[in-house]
Image (cartoon, rainbow, N blue to C red):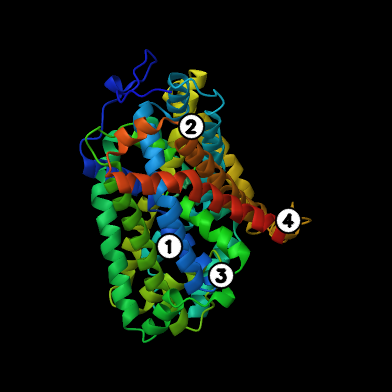
Amino acid sequence: MSESSAPISGAMKGSNAKRGLWSSRLAFILAATGSAVGLGNVWKFPYITGENGGGAFVLVYLLCIAAIGLPIMMAEVLIGRRGGRSPVNSLREIARHDKLNPAWPIVGAIGVIAGFLILSFYSVIGGWAASYVVKAGSGQLAGQSADAIGAIFSDLLADPATLLMWHTLFMALVMLVVAKGVRAGLERAVSILMPALFLLLLTVVGYAMTTGEFGRAVTFLFQPDFSKLTTSGILVALGHAFFTLSLGMAVMMAYGSYLPKNISIAKTSIAVCVIDTGVALLAGLAIFPIVFANGLEPGAGPGLIFQTLPLAFAQMPMGSLFGTLFFVLLIFAAWTSGISLLEPIVEWLEEQKGMNRTTSTLGAGFVCWALGITSILSLNLWSDFAPLGAISMLEGKTIFDLLDFFTANILLPLGGLLIAVFAGWVMSRQAMEDELALSKPMFRLWYITVRYITPVAVGAVFIYNLIGS
Ligand code: TRP
């Protein structure tokens, strides 16, 4: 075991000297937030909260963010900065330097697979958001009733050709940025677009307060009713904590490798977690008052925001303008997240297979795009096709549902678990103390969490769900 605090230096290509660092702490926070804040916050969080009964689910989710998500984010950033390379090579270098088992880079491989699978359906949902820019902008939503808006959404899902067109567009946007190299444009775009999205969400929350059902929404979101909490709900909350923070597939590890040494990993990680959670809660506060005021169903599923937000925009003054803006910003949020899903795959292809950036982007993007078609068909032609329906836990799940379930609820927590074990049990404690530079009691708290609490909690939720199903 190494007791040295010096960063590992190696002769491998792509070491820190050549890669450049983030221009500031803010730049890192913006980029990490750009990855974290996305469809997970605005689309997924509200609908899974609705499906899982509200308050108690939200409480478990917040607990998972604080007690599991934050410590794992710190671990990922730490490993990345320590290794100073792409995730697979960072793990390999640390393992080699500390004479550890060379199998650890497998965590990076899990990340690459998870990235492929997530991006395939993520792009389809990004496409939904894109199609709503046009719907809002052309005034199609103005003055419509809840039923009419519901019908507009079901018509979209029933139409594979239109879905394919928007999915293709979204994937092309992601590939465009990744092919050009991520850093230059990303920092600047995120620093403008993220605050704008935040402001627009606040505007919708402001509108939602006038609907008269704001109090009911607050009760629904924040008053826990544990009778509504199921074991699968706990698994979904845990999985979502990973998904929304972009954890478990070494994305934060990749970003951490660009973080200068003098910047506090703990403070920056806390900032990212707080912003991400803030956006999700704001989205909930924007959506549920509209759900209740219009007699809609909180458990409506993946279409929830596309049935509620357009309704708010249909009714509020200058709604077409705000609606268009909102969906544009949602696309940007999804875009920056999509980029962070494709980037690790492309980096991996470049390093491991020696492909150039354009070829690897085109290749990886094409495979994701093709896989995305199965998600599109799950919404219409294949909507009754449940390939693993024989397993009771997966009953009635379409390919789209399975991709979501398998990545968020299995692969990401598993990746996160391995990362926690790597940090808690494998890396040298001295190296981590140096990287984190925390006070003794704070370090101990973090260390105990990644060593014991996280593995036990993730393991327990897994086992409980296996037994329960
Ligand atoms: N966090 C993003 C969201 O909430 C999704 C995402 C982007 C992601 N990159 C990731 C999830 C990496 C897991 C791992 O929309």
N-terminal of the pair, mark 3 or mark 4, is 3
N-terminal of the pair, mark 2 or mark 4, is 4
Q: Distance from label 4 to label 1 (Cα)?
A: 32 Å
Q: Distance from label 3 to label 4 (Cα)?
A: 20 Å
- Image quarter hosting the N terminus: top left
Q: Which residue is mark 4?
A: 386
Query: Label 4 crowding class (10 Å Cα cut-off): few <14, some 14-19, many 20+?
Result: some
Residue 150 at x, y percent in the picture: 53, 73
Q: Distance from label 2 to label 1 (Cα)?
A: 28 Å
- Image quarter hosting the C terminus: bottom right
Q: What is the number of the mark on residue 62? A: 1
The amino acid type found where label 2 is placed reads Val
Residue 14 lies in what quarter of the image? top left
Q: Nearer the viewer, residue 370 or 416?
A: 416
Q: Which residue is mark 2?
A: 426
> For numbered disc 4, what is the local secondary structure?
loop
Front of the two marks 2 and 1? 2
N-terminal of the pair, mark 2 or mark 1, is 1
Front of the two marks 2 and 4? 2
Q: Residue at x 42, y 61 (%)?
A: 42
